[in-house]
Image (spheres, coloured by chain):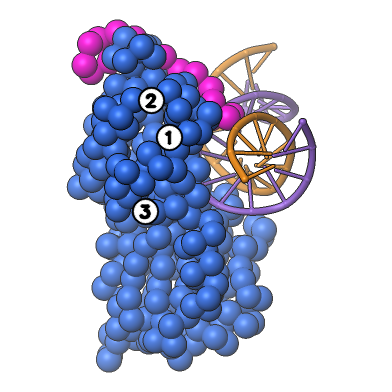
Chain colours: A blue, B orange, C purple
Amino acid sequence: MPELPEVETMRRGVACVAGSLIDRVEFPRIKARPIGVSPSRERFRRRAIGKRIIDVGRIGKRVVLTLDDESSIILEPRMTGLVLLADPPTAEHLRLRMSLSAGRKRRELMFWDRRGLGSAHLLSPAQLVALREEKLGPDALAISVEQLRERLGKSRREIKVALLDQAVVAGVGNLYASELLHVARVHPRRRCYLLSKTQWERIHAAMLKVLEEAIRYEGSTLSDGTYRNALNKAGGYQNEHRVYDKADAACPTCQSPITRIVQAQRSTFFCPNCQRKSR
DNA sequence: CATATGTCCTGAGAGC
DNA sequence: TGCTCTCAGGACATAT
């Protein structure tokens, strides 16, 4: 579930490793399926060891460690991945461990993933550019309302589904798409090309508001408890959700019951009163 | 080309 | 109690 706010919280939690040297890289042997990694483990290790991390960034839902030879390590949590400095929740799902040093200070930066859908990639500068330009749209915190409209204004897709497309805008996932459309008062099934300029402005403003709010609360830890920040602390935004996973609960704005629908095999939650198609 | 659907994965929870 | 089944949704592959 980690979306932009959770990944940004992870990034902030490990930002302190900037300046550290990578002394060791291990892919612990576990029973579960091995982590998706590129290049091969041995090459990854060889190309990472001895390098210095000069920056800890984020693109969309991925954490980016920039190394001093301009290559970068991309950590992609997908559903259950965590980027940790603290002890991982279980030993059996620890997929990657990097031993770092900064002077005498030693630290372990770990990638833990219960379901194993996440991955780690060491990319050349050209590969990073390709990822940015070919697979991902502008970051959800940086995209302008004009860019958003340019990219989706003529699309026939439903707005909720379109917002999940990382090539359109990077960082929005299933949870925050429902949340932001509620704030924007836009029906999730509304086709993009039918949205008015005002509605695009509301969507854009709501996206920023909801994502920034969620970052302030350090993301959402759902009932399965999986998501934690780098120090193994749960987020707080789950208590602020307006509609997500709240079918039949009262809308915080108008008290009407919240509805659950399915779009592209994913749950969407919305208020049929506040988010009428006609407005 | 744009859009839709299927797939991977594990553990929680439902239902019998 | 203990089994089987369904579901959760990141991103990508394949289909339409």
The verdict on residue A264 being magenta is: yes
Q: Is residue A240 above or below residue A249?
A: below
Amino acid type, residue under disc 1 in the picture: Gly
Element assignment for label 2 = loop
Name the residue located 32 percent from the left edge and 76 percent from the top edge: A55
Element assignment for label 1 = loop
Q: CA distance from mark 2 to mark 1?
A: 8 Å
The verdict on a common chain for dots 1 and 3 is yes
Q: Are marks 2 and 1 in contact (CB under 8 Å)?
A: yes
Q: CA distance from mark 1 to mark 3?
A: 18 Å
- For disc 2, the marked residue is A195
- Crowdedness near tag 3: few (<14), some (14–19) or many (≥20) residues, C-alpha within 10 Å: many
The picture places residue A21, in percent across and down from the top left corner, at 37, 87
Earlier-in-chain disc, 3 versus 2: 3
The verdict on a common chain for dots 2 and 1 is yes
Amino acid type, residue under disc 3 in the picture: Asp
Per the rendered image, the range of residues in magenta is A249-266
* The one of A22 and A182 positioned closer to us in this rendering: A182
Name the residue located 50 percent from the left edge and 33 percent from the top edge: A155
Q: In which quadrant of the rendered view does residue A138 lie?
A: bottom left
Q: Chain of mark 2?
A: A
- For disc 1, the marked residue is A153
- For disc 3, the marked residue is A139
- Crowdedness near tag 1: few (<14), some (14–19) or many (≥20) residues, C-alpha within 10 Å: some
Amino acid type, residue under disc 2 in the picture: Leu
* The one of A94 and A256 positioned closer to us in this rendering: A256
The verdict on residue A274 being magenta is: no
- Crowdedness near tag 2: few (<14), some (14–19) or many (≥20) residues, C-alpha within 10 Å: many
Q: In which quadrant of the rendered view does residue A12 lie?
A: bottom left
